[in-house]
Image (tube, helix red, strand yellow):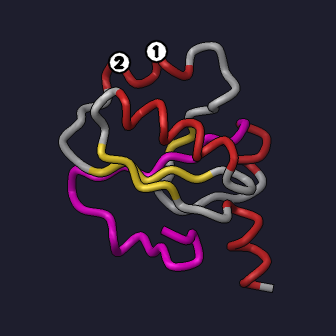
Amino acid sequence: MPITDFSNDALGAKDLLIDVRTPGEFAEGHFEGAVNIDWMSDDFMASWDTIPKGGKVYLYCKKGGRSAMAAHVLDSLGYRVVDLTGGWDALTAEQE
């Protein structure tokens, strides 16, 4: 799904919105309610040990590369993943 089509209204009660950018990138701006789980961190996979697979997981990053890789991995683990393509840069460019 293009990130420009996403709205927090799309989130169900069991869904999660995950920003896979670095904490510094996250601090510069993110969706309200997003949780930061840095794809580049050594403990990325361990972060998912306690996250249930009941809802959808919406992922985004800066341009789409990291979220695409994370989506592939999480999909293989049984998560229902929606990759918000285009990334934060596409969203902020549209808002300018």
Tell me the residue at 74%/56% (across/down).
63
In front: 49, or 79? 79
Amino acid of disc 2: Asp
- x and y, in percent, of residue 50 in the image: 31, 22
Label number found at residue 34: none
Q: Hey, what amino acid is under mark 1?
A: Ala
Q: Quadrant of the C terminus?
A: bottom right
Residue highlighted by disc 1: 46
| Disc 2 secondary structure class | helix
Q: Nearer the viewer, residue 90 or 75?
A: 75
Q: Which residues are magenta?
A: 1-22
Residue under numbered circle 2: 49
Judge whether 31 appears above or below 49 on screen. Answer: below
Disc 2/disc 1 C-alpha distance (Å): 5 Å
Taking the magenta stretch, the answer to whether it contains residue 15 is yes
Residue neighbourhood size for the residue with mark 1, other residues' Cα within 10 Å, grouped as few (<14), some (14–19), many (≥20): few
Q: Is residue 21 magenta?
A: yes
Residue 89, position in %: x, y? 77, 65
Residue located 28% across and 32% down the image: 78
Q: Secondary structure at mark 1?
A: helix
Q: Are marks 2 and 1 in contact (CB under 8 Å)?
A: yes
